[in-house]
Amino acid sequence: MLGHLTILEVVDLLLMLGGGGILVGKLVRHQRRLGRDPLQGSPLRVNTLSAYWVWLALLAYVLSGLIGFGIAMFYNPGGPAADVELWRTIIGGNIAQLIVAGAVLAIAAHTFVAGLRGLGVGRQPFGRDLWAAVQGLLVGFCLCNLVLWATDAGLRLFAPRFEMPMHGVFITLAMPTTPLFVRFNAILGAALLAPIGEELLFRGILQTACQRLVPPRWHSLYHRWIAIVGVATLFGLMHLATPQQVPALIVLGILLGILYERTGSILAPIYLHVLFNSKSLTWHYLESVVNTVP
């Protein structure tokens, strides 16, 4: 059976097995601790986030998109109108991520005790953040692939005529007419800017703020779990351009939220998000190379 798999598919299976092994190990460790809540002992993020600041962050998110796409409208390298519109979307999205990241950092510096350190910047050594992100990547890769396979099977069974759209970044990279400047922006945005902007907003602000909206119970961390799952669901739904990936992205969002809570570091989920997107970009490139080899 393995003889029919490509090298990339074999590597995928090995990565999934590695992630499954880590997940089983953590579940066994959880049982040995008599089922203690995995979030117990997680660091606190003392803050004064109120509805005002949350709405301000969301307003910054909306305005950053309008500003980014407005600036991108001045970019006109020529080519088919549909292609130029897609290229402008890529560039505008990158500008928007830069603006929203700056706005969120400014809000966090004002509302978190200890400023950006309270948000989780520089809270623990780089190596610990990276190691936590690598483990999260393997677990996430395992779970997300299983969910993707289940979603694909469900769509083929119940909606056989549904055509799964490709992400705009991959469409842009696949077009031979795409200018080098746009290719650079597509990779930069997907691999770095989007993970930074999205994690700062979704995990740093929204997940933290949601915990304040749910009244805590004595000896219970349910308010943290509600915030994790709620924001992860919103995170997945924000990617409706590729609806077949929404369930898997919700699972990824939950893992990102748990990682943030467990480490108290916003850098850990950012690193995981960067690695996850970079892996997808790398596999897309390698598959394109393999398909063009005569």
Image (tube, rainbow, N blue to C red):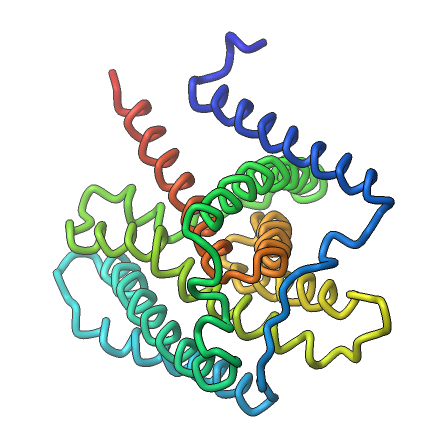
Q: Is residue 61 left or right of residue 67?
A: right
Between 84 and 13, the one lying in front of the other is 13
Q: Quadrant of the N terminus?
A: top right
Residue 122 rendering spot, x and y as whole percentages: 42, 62
Labels in figure, total: 0
Between 107 and 173, the one lying in front of the other is 107
Residue 100 rendering spot, x and y as whole percentages: 39, 75
Residue at image point 28% right, 64% down = 85
- On screen, residue 273 above or below 67: above
- On screen, residue 250 above or below 55: above
Between 81 and 91, the one lying in front of the other is 91
Q: Is residue 136 left or right of residue 217?
A: left
Residue 74 rendering spot, x and y as whole percentages: 17, 74
Residue at image point 16% right, 56% down = 79
Q: Quadrant of the C terminus?
A: top left
- On screen, residue 81 above or below 206: above
Q: Is residue 175 left or right of residue 263?
A: left
Quarter-of-image position of residue 193: bottom left
- On screen, residue 10 above or below 192: above
Residue at image point 47% right, 50% down = 129
Residue at image point 70% right, 40% down = 154
Residue 242 rendering spot, x and y as whole percentages: 51, 53
Between 76 and 124, the one lying in front of the other is 124
